[in-house]
């Protein structure tokens, strides 16, 4: 007695098709997530009043660049990380001529004039911003 087993449709072809569909779905999801994060970050920068030029420094890229992959990834970064980070952390800001020191609005003691600043106020605000101590 002979037993013959024939599976139709072809199981291997079905699995290949499912893997290809999964690769396309993961790659499309990464493209969409990267673009959404980039747009949201740009919106936060513009909403904070830092301007569209700084917002346009936000970039995103999806890997692999061509084709689809189950291991697709999206990277979102800023081409001006020092500026974006300084506004986020509340770092001390010095003007070009050095005559005025600006600090974040929460830590600002008063008008931005060296004569009006209490002694050591700018330095204390900078130390607090560096140490992460906020009011």
Image (cartoon, rainbow, N blue to C red):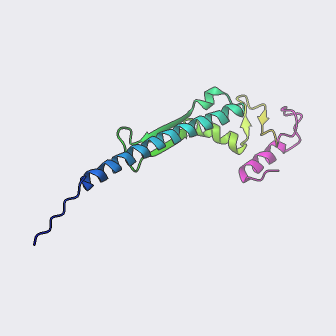
Place residue 107 in its image quadrant. top right
Place residue 27 in its image quadrant. top left
Judge whether residue 115 is colored magenta.
Answer: yes
* Residue furthest front in the image: 1
Q: How many marks are shown on the rendered structure?
A: 0
- The N terminus is located in which quarter? bottom left
Q: Is residue 47 visible?
A: yes
The image shows residue 94, relative to residue 2, as above or below, that is above
Q: Is residue 69 visible?
A: no
Question: Which of 107 and 44 lies nearest the eye of the viewer?
Answer: 44
> Is 119 left, or right, of 132 in this rendering?
right
Judge whether residue 130 is colored magenta.
Answer: yes
x, y percent for residue 86: 67, 41
Question: Which of 85 and 4 lies nearest the eye of the viewer?
Answer: 4
Question: Which of 101 and 128 lies nearest the eye of the viewer?
Answer: 128
x, y percent for residue 56: 58, 29
Place residue 91 in its image quadrant. top right
Please report the residue visible at 47 percent of the width from the left and 38 percent of the height from the top.
Answer: 61
Please report the residue visible at 44 percent of the width from the left and 41 percent of the height from the top.
Answer: 28
* Residue furthest bottom in the image: 1
> Is 30 left, or right, of 102 in this rendering?
left
Please report the residue visible at 73 percent of the width from the left and 52 percent of the height from the top.
Answer: 132
Question: Which of 3 and 15 lies nearest the eye of the viewer?
Answer: 3
x, y percent for residue 74: 48, 43
x, y percent for residue 123: 79, 45
Q: What predominant SS class does the magenta segment belong to? A: loop
Range of magenta residues: 107-135
Please report the residue visible at 87 percent of the width from the left and 40 percent of the height from the top.
Answer: 109
């Amino acid at each position: 007695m002979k037993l013959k087993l024939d599976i139709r449709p072809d199981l291997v072809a079905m699995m290949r098709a499912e893997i290809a569909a999964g690769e396309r779905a993961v790659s499309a999801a990464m493209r969409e997530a990267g673009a959404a994060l980039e747009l949201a970050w740009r919106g936060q920068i513009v909403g904070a009043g830092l301007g569209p030029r700084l917002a346009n420094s936000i970039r995103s890229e999806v890997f692999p660049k061509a084709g689809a992959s189950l291991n697709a990834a999206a990277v979102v970064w800023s081409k001006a990380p020092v500026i974006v980070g300084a506004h986020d952390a509340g770092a001390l800001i010095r003007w070009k001529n050095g005559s005025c020191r600006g600090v974040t609005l929460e830590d600002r003691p008063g008008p931005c004039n060296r004569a009006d600043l209490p002694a050591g106020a700018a330095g204390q605000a900078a130390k607090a911003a560096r140490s992460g101590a906020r009011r």
